[in-house]
Image (spheres, rainbow, N blue to C red):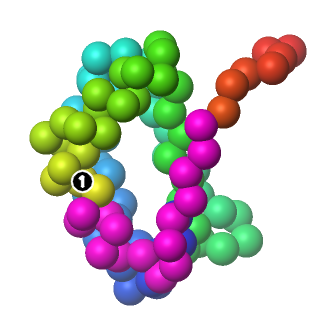
Amino acid sequence: MTFKSENVDLFENIFEKYHSKIRSAEGCLSLKLLRGVDNPNVFFTYSTWQDPSFLDVYRKSETFGIVWPQTKALFAEPAEAWTTEEKYDL
């Protein structure tokens, strides 16, 4: 997610306020917030879910319905989201 520089603190406040609710969603195994080293306006949320169906349920939750519109309003560019699978854990 790329944020307008004036919105970075607002995003971090949203994440701080809601990260425990996101992390405690059923099936959420981990949640990380990563920040770009070369571009401090770029953030990635990295979450691991027990099964993709749990992520789908979260995306229909009240928490997501609050967090996503607030976050989306702060973007400088459209966000990208990827669903991946682990190939190796070395």
Instruction: State the residue in front, 20 or 74.
Output: 74
37 relative position to 40: left or right = right
29 relative position to 68: left or right = right
Residue 74, quarter of the rendered image: bottom left
Note whether 24 is above or below 8 in the view shown.
above
* Residue 52 in view (yes/no): yes
Residue 80: percent from left, percent from top: 56, 59
Span shown in magenta:
69-83
Amino acid marked by disc 1 = Val
4 relative position to 67: left or right = right
Note whether 66 is above or below 25 in the view shown.
below
Q: Magenta-highlighted stretch: main secondary structure?
A: loop
27 relative position to 49: left or right = left
Residue 16: percent from left, percent from top: 29, 49
Residue 90: percent from left, percent from top: 86, 15
Note whether 2 is above or below 13 in the view shown.
below
Instruction: State the residue in front, 86 or 44.
Output: 86
Instruction: State the residue in front, 5 or 25.
Output: 25
Q: Which residue is mark 1?
A: 67
Residue 60: percent from left, percent from top: 23, 38
Q: Residue at x 36, y 31 (%)?
A: 56
Q: Residue at x 50, y 33 (%)?
A: 47
Q: Residue at x 73, y 22 (%)?
A: 86
Residue 40, quarter of the rendered image: bottom right
> Secondary structure beneath disc 1?
helix
* Residue 18 in view (yes/no): no
